[in-house]
Image (spheres, rainbow, N blue to C red):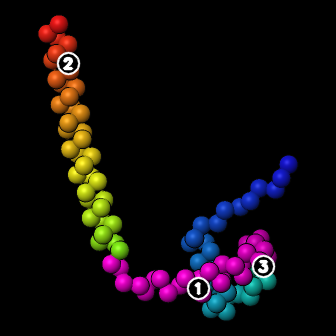
Amino acid sequence: MGKRRRIFTPDFKFQIVLELLTGEKRAAQLCRVHQISETSLSRWRQQFLEHGARVFEDGNAAPAEQERIAELERMIGRLTMELAAAKKASDWLDSLQ
């Protein structure tokens, strides 16, 4: 039997890295308490330092995504109505036979 890999949430990783960077706890202490490897912690820290600037990026992508979601929701609504109409027409045609 192989060893199962644990999956850590982004919130958990963020909290651990934050404790490390603020000096609240040392790396060895965090690894011991949370039973994680120093390699994982160092990788999370590096990812945080490399990608942390994204938090402050301009949110121009969000409105475009919201518009796309709204468009897809309108399409789903229209298709639902068309399907309901087609079912009624099918039932009506079946009743004529």
Q: In which quarter of the image is residue 30?
A: bottom right
Between marks 1 and 3, how big is the CA–CA gap? 18 Å
Residue at the image point whose x is 24% and y is 33% from the top: 83
Q: Distance between the residues labelled 2 and 3?
A: 66 Å
Question: Which residue, given by chain and number where applicable, does mark 3 sit on?
Answer: 38
Cα distance in 3D space between marks 2 and 1: 60 Å
Question: What residue is drawn where x is 20% and y is 13%?
Answer: 94
Q: Which of 10 and 28 is in front in this view?
A: 10
Provide residue 16's location: percent of width, then percent of height. Answer: 65, 79
- Taking the view exactly as shown, the residue that stands out farthest to the right is 1
- The image position of residue 88, as x and y in percent, is 18, 24
Numbered range of the magenta stretch: 32-60
Lower position in the chain sequence, tag 2 or tag 1: 1
Name the residue beneath numbered marker 2: 91
Secondary structure of the residue carrying numbered label 3: helix
49 drawn magenta: yes
Per the image, the residue denoted by label 1 is: 50
Label 2 or label 3, whichever lies nearer to me, is 2
Q: In which quarter of the image is the C terminus?
A: top left
Q: Are marks 2 and 1 in contact (CB under 8 Å)?
A: no
Q: What residue type is labelled 2?
A: Asp
Who comes first in sequence, dot 1 or dot 3? 3
Crowd rating for badge 3 (residues with CA inside 10 Å; few <14, some 14–19, many 20+): some
Q: Residue at x 77, y 70 (%)?
A: 35
